[in-house]
Amino acid sequence: MTATVLVINSGSSSIKYQLVDPEGGEALASGLVERIGEERGRLRHTSAAGVVEHMDPIPDHGAGLRMILDLFATVGPRLDEAGVVAVGHRVVQGGAYFGGPAVADDRVIEVIERLSPLAPLHNPANLRGILVARELLPGVPHIAVFDTAFFRSLPERAATYALDREVARKYRVRRYGAHGTSHQYVARMAAQLLGRPMAELRQVVLHLGNGASASAVDRGRAVDTSMGMTPLEGLVMGTRTGDIDPAVMFHLHRIGGMSVDEIDDLVNRRSGLKGLAGVNDLREIHTLVAAGDRDARLALDVYVHRLRKYIGAYAAILGGLDVLTFTAGVGENDDIVRAEALAGLEFLGIELDPARNAGRKKEATVISTDSSRVAVLVVPTNEELEIARQAVSLL
Ligand code: ADP
């Protein structure tokens, strides 16, 4: 019997789950419970038996997880026969505490709770998932896997903001990063695809989804990343500004009369590609650009300019580059963004092969020329598999 891991990603009103075979990498079932606490909840469960959907009220996370477990029992695969060796829980903020996965015991739960002010939307929701799952699945170890853990290794000079040190210490202000599970998985898969040990490679990973982040990975260790204390910093994203002069916020408050909450909403949910072009999906941006829309063209230019800036900066921090990898929704599917981001970077040793770059990539692929000094890759990310593997690594 194969060993499997149930991976749970609990949000404020949702639970995403996957039953994963960490060895083979296969997902045996997956699903999503949505609109917990609302009038009409929704559950979608996908397995070998097909897709099952329910529309029932789901009062809380406990009820949601109970419905999921019922579906495993009735539709399959049956968890008692699936060899579940652990439940892996995604936790967004591990602060300066967790550099790897941790058994979600009472002490760890208390730390996750204490870190909630750094991720007020996420950590409490992640915790809710852990608590109900521990109750409903008491027979297996529950492992917390942190989105920040891969970046726990950042050198102090990269993690520290040039802010008054007492204030920074008191409020725990520093760069924690995010998407770490994806960056770690992709960096490892990139080395594997090239058949070279991580310990030899200077890598840049570009995780470009609706949220987007870049990382510099020096011989397996993350040495810089673009997201900061929160996921707002860095690259241009679907709806977030990424890097922006913080004094813009004071200006909007003092001169524009906007409240802190309004500014928070503006820079996180109404900016980025959406703010510039009116839409946040790059497919729609390309359609608008092709139709001659100048706002969309500028949005794409700003997006690509920021990417190029980070590629250059990280090449400098790493003292050269061996591998550059694209991942997530945009990185895996958007050949225009990939081509524009790397155009004219031959001086860094980057030569994209237009034919190899063309189209969407469902598998790990080399898209640079054979003579390119830097291997350019697309590697589809798989955070659930990485969580499952990290959970198993603790057993
Ligand atoms: P999330 O951050 O929500 O996990 P994803 O990694 O799924 O996001 O990425 C979603 C984004 O990927 C979409 O907003 C869109 O911009 C982009 N995307 C998805 N498919 C394509 C495609 N075929 N071509 C270009 N961009 C795409």
Image (tube, helix red, strand yellow):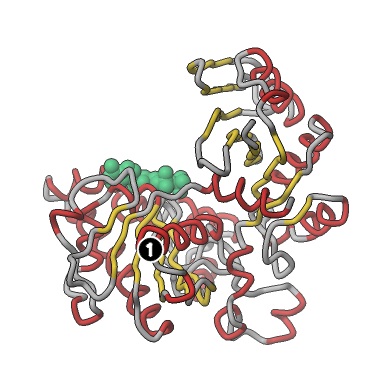
Q: Is residue 70 left or right of residue 253?
A: right
> Does the image show residue 280?
no
Q: Residue at x 79, y 50 (%)?
A: 104
List x then y, in percent, for residue 9: 63, 41
Q: Is residue 48 left or right of residue 392?
A: left
List x then y, in percent, for residue 240: 45, 57
Q: Quadrant of residue 354?
A: bottom left
Q: Residue at x 78, y 52 (%)?
A: 103
Q: Please, which residue is most extreme toward the front here?
A: 1
| Nearer to us in this view, 281 or 354 | 354
Image quarter where the N terminus lies is top right
Give the labeled residue for mark 1. Answer: 195
Q: Amino acid at mark 1?
A: Gly
List x then y, in percent, for residue 212: 43, 58
- Label 1 neighbourhood size at 10 Å, few (<14), some (14-19), many (20+)? few
Quadrant of the rendered image holding ligand 1: top left
Q: Quadrant of residue 101?
A: bottom right
Q: Residue at x 44, y 70 (%)?
A: 243
Measured along the vertical axis of the image, is residue 42 above or below residue 176?
A: above
Measured along the vertical axis of the image, is residue 165 above or below residue 262?
A: below
| Nearer to us in this view, 155 or 101 | 101
List x then y, in percent, for residue 338: 25, 59
Q: Is residue 362 left or right of residue 107?
A: left
Measured along the vertical axis of the image, is residue 228 above or below residue 60?
A: below
